Amino acid sequence: MISDENRKWWVLGALAISLLTVGLDLTVLNLALPTLATEMHATNGELQWFADAYNLVIAALLLPAGLLGDKWGRKKMLLLALLVFGGASAACAFAGTPSALIAGRAVLGLGAAFLLPLSMSIIPVLFTEEERPKAIGIWVMANSLGIPLGPIIGGWLLNHYWWGSVFLMNVPIILIGLIAVAVLLPESRSTERTKVDFFGIVLSSLGLVSLTYGVIEAGEKGWGDAAALVPVIGGALLLVLFILWERRTTHPLVDLTLFRSSSFTWGSVLATVVSFAMFGLLFVTPQYFQEVEGADALGTGLRLLPIVGGLLVGAKVSDELQVRIGAKTTIAFGFLLLAAGLMLGATTALGNGYGFASIWVSIVGLGIGFVLPAAMDVSMSALSPERSGSGSALIMTLRQVGGTIGVAILGTILSTVYRDKLNVEGLSSDVAEAVRRSVSDGASAARGIPSPELLESVRSSFVHGMDAMLWVCGGVAALGIVITLAFLQLPLNEKAKAITKFEPNNVRE
């Protein structure tokens, strides 16, 4: 028999396992793209939409998902999210056409958009102030570990089974989450009976989708392309209009008064800064290991394990350090580790090998483990059980947008330096264009000619681009130190206020 005290940890554990599938789905698809292109005869545009359909739906629905959980019940909406995610996973696994897979990925994004903020929103409701850092550490690890584990699990499945297995693996995991939530999680909802801000939902959804789509296009076509600039500007204007509407409406989708809290504002900013650097790192390292180090998909996943190890150790130590030296010092030290690891990585040369890479990616993982749980704990200290759903959704939205923009900006830096360093003299225009497109196309073209000199140029140019990108990531991490020390304030009265917001009476059996 599970005691009432242990019940909440069992629920969090089941949700943590379920969250692994969300992270897995961010990376595992990339491994399956070559297979899908062959077996489904998918075009490049369709391959891009396999990923973008998932990301755009998440961007559109994160904010309303949190509000609906507060209003209609977090347990009820979590169960619905798990059902949708599991059903969509099965639909993706057995999709027979590119259109069916794109539709399945969109529904998968719908489930993820509810699962992410609602799984986080139960933390202020179920856990005390003292328990919350440990609970958030578990949540962050679950949300982050799926990303580097995707290539490992996905690579093994693709080597042994058909491509649909990378989606079908979600189903048994989701079933565990469904049973645990249904049996162990008490229902909770806001006692405030407010109207749904439908106009705010429309404005925020359109704005976030437009901004995210434009940023994705900018990563593909460059920031000067109209297909990228128009949606970015349009999305930004819609979001400005959304903020103006939220300030005047009586039932806002987002409680803007949360930004009056230093802990919420700067904790969210710092979590977003980490996401900017982390998404950029996870964008470049798989390409480096595959195209420069020559690893296959499974080998690439295994080479990312030091990030996982560093994250696990960092999150564990961070939890203990927050009690001893405080969140502010812990976060600043974490950013110091993150900046040091990234800047060490920025000195990578073509002949360094994996031994050098394993050192700096471990330091980066350690830094992320120190910063991310602590920053999110700080931001969530301002959330009451009444608004935990919408507040959690706002934190997740900021992280999602920060990560997406990070990949686009850092990807542009990588591509620009890569193209500038390439030596394409004497190549035909078709081959030169293929080489400039990406390191993968460049390496394939060099092997096809074959030309060891061109392959050396491609790899060397990519390493130069990666180094430039990692210097920028390191600079962003160093900025995190400055923000932490200059702006993050955790006065005692604010801590006391956060403790008084824990109201177990708001949890309804």
Image: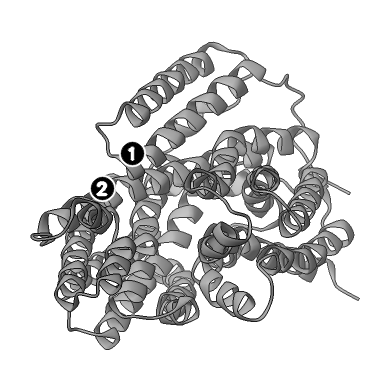
* SS category of the residue bearing label 2: helix
Q: Residue at x 53, y 60 (%)?
A: 33
Q: Is residue 248 above or below residue 151?
A: above
Q: Quadrant where the N terminus lies?
A: bottom right
Marks 1/2: CA distance?
8 Å
Cβ atoms at labels 1 and 2 below 8 Å apart: yes
Q: x%, y% of residue 456?
A: 17, 75
Return the x and y of residue 491 as percentages of the image width and height. 39, 47
Q: How is the image coloured?
A: one colour
Q: Quadrant of residue 262?
A: top left
Numbered circle sitting on residue 218: 1
Say whether disc 1 or disc 2 marks the residue closer to the N-terminus.
Answer: 1
Circle count: 2
Q: Position of residue 58 (x, y in %)?
A: 58, 42
The residue identified by callout 2 is 412
Residue at image coords 73%, 21%:
194
Residue type at the position of mark 1: Ala
